Amino acid sequence: MDEIVLLERLLISLVLGGIIGLERQYNEKPAGFTTNSLICLGSTLFTILSVKMMGVGDPGRIAAQIITGVGFLGAGAILREGNKVSGLTTAACVWLVAAVGMAIGFGNYILGASAAGLVLVVQLVFRKSLGVLERIKKYETIHVVCEPSWSVVDTISSTMAKHNVEIKTRTILKENGLFVVRIVAAVTGPEFERIAKDLFVMPGIKELTR
């Protein structure tokens, strides 16, 4: 294979990975410009090496190891905080960037560039659509950890009523000397943020998640 063609593939993968990485960096996500650029470049390089191995070994084994290695990288980006899991989008993006690099490494420029473009469409366009959905009321389970005081529990309910949020169900448990209040209510994203700001100024509130 011509060395100029190989260099061309490496440069294209670096550019595509960098473009995706710039979007992640702009939105202050864990895997940014450098990470995505290197993952895409590395995937392309390993793919080129697997193509050069044809007739000597099994090129599919290297491609399979790329997927496994990227899986470990993506798993490192996933974090669980209470009832929320973060980093799934970052992990999926890392996985897709590796796939883009493999496509370029095999010489499928249009496929790789199209996939990179679709990643940007999902990240840029769909994120704005989700912002609209956040303003639609939907039933959420809100978890509040507070001091074991009934006056604090009543204040939580009155705070939600102040923001015109109707409580469907309310469950109170006692764990480790604290009250855990689970509230099911129809609430929008902005309403939850306003409620959280009001509750966190109260000294009895320890934790608030949904």
Image: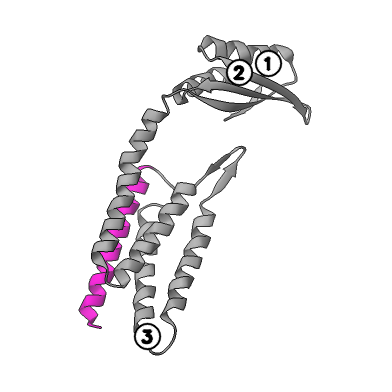
Q: Quadrant of residue 98?
A: bottom left
Residue indicated by mark 2? 168
Residue in the foreground of this view, choosing between 67 and 198: 67
Cα separation, mark 3 vs mark 1, equals 68 Å
Residue indicated by mark 3? 54
Secondary structure, magenta segment, majority class = helix
Residue in the foreground of this view, choosing between 81 and 128: 128
Residue 188: x and y in percent read 47, 23
| Residue 192 in the figure: left or right of residue 150 | left
Type of the residue with mark 3: Met
| Residue at 44 percent of width and 86 percent of height | 57
| Residue 105 in the figure: left or right of residue 156 | left
Residue 53 is labelled as none
24 vs 131: above or below: below
99 vs 86: above or below: below
Is residue 202 visible to the viewer in this orientation of the structure?
no
Closer to the chain start, of discs 2 and 3, is: 3
- Tell me the element at label 2: strand
Callout 2 environment at 10 Å: few (<14), some (14 to 19), or many (20+)?
A: few
Q: Which residue lies furthest to the bottom in this view?
A: 56
Residue 153 is labelled as 1
